[in-house]
Image (cartoon, grey):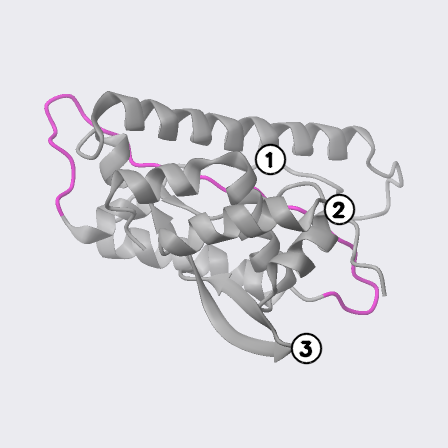
Amino acid sequence: MLLDSEERIKAFTHPYRMKLVHVLRETRRPMTATEVARFIGDGPGRVHYHMRVLEAAGIVNVARTETVNGIVARYYEPTARHYSVGDAVRGTIGGEAVRDEVTRMIGRRFRDGLRSFLESAAAADSDADAAPAAFLFERSVHCDDGQWLEFRDAVEALAERYAEPGAGSRRRRVFVAGTTDRREGDPGPRMEGARAASSIVAPDWPPHPGPDR
């Protein structure tokens, strides 16, 4: 989804609302605001409010409704797999104020990802015969806009392949970022696929306690 208005960008970049979107992605099923609140250990009123903001901005939608004892329960799910903030990064939506807000959001994402990596690596098992508990990988690739989208989708498909827990599996967390180098004097790619470099998926926050059963 292209976040093509200041309202959508501000709704999406709020740290608490990004956390709610992540919960919906992590649980992989539609949830009510009350279920999300229980999942993260917060009050339902706060979650209800922020979920309505996300809904109004089109970032989440209502997958279905159920009426129980006269109360309508709304089950939310993310509207898109990816949310593009490319135009805001370039300053064409909302000017400098919105661009700075998006920059702060991306900075938080990197800090959270780095902190999680360092904490996990420091607490890693010391068994020399086991698979490495953490790794760091960086490479340059060369591709056109269509291939860049394919690359992003291939990374996501690989993560999706291992999304469900299985026998002998352990929770492992991955933070991936990709961007396009800009040469001096290069106006940058004009194709829609160029926005892939600024696509955002809700971050891999520290795991939440599961709901009471």
The residue that disc 2 covers is 41
Residue that badge 1 annotates: 136
Q: Quadrant of the N terminus?
A: bottom left
Which residue shows up at 64% across the image and 41% down it?
205
Between tags 3 and 2, which lies in front? 3
Query: Disc number at residue 69?
Result: 3
Looking at the image, which is closer to me, 128 or 15?
A: 15
Distance from label 3 to label 1 (Cα)?
A: 52 Å
Q: Is residue 106 left or right of residue 126?
A: left
Q: Amino acid at mark 2?
A: Gly
Q: Secondary structure at mark 1?
A: loop
* Residue 13: x %, y % from top left: 43, 37
Question: Which of disc 2 and disc 3 is earlier in sequence?
Answer: 2
Question: Does 126 sit left or right of 42 as displayed?
Answer: right
In the figure, residue 183 lies in which quadrant?
top left
Lower sequence index among marks 3 and 1: 3
- Mark 2 vs mark 1, foreground winner is 2
Which contiguous range is marked in magenta? 165-190
- Distance CA(mark 3)–CA(mark 2): 25 Å
Q: Which amino acid does the dot numbered 3 rest on? A: Asn
Relative to residue 134, is residue 33 drawn left or right? left
- Between the C-alphas of marks 2 and 1, the distance is 32 Å
Image quadrant containing the C terminus: bottom right
Q: Residue at x 60, y 69 (%)?
A: 29
Q: Earlier in the sequence, mark 2 or mark 1?
A: 2
Whether 137 is drawn above or below 54: the answer is above
Residue 172 in view here = no
Query: Is 168 contained in the magenta span?
Result: yes
Q: Is residue 210 left or right of residue 117?
A: right
Q: Which x, y percent locates residue 114?
A: 61, 29
Tell me if mark 2 has few (under 14), some (14-19) or many (20+) residues whose alpha carbon lies within 10 angstroms of its own.
few
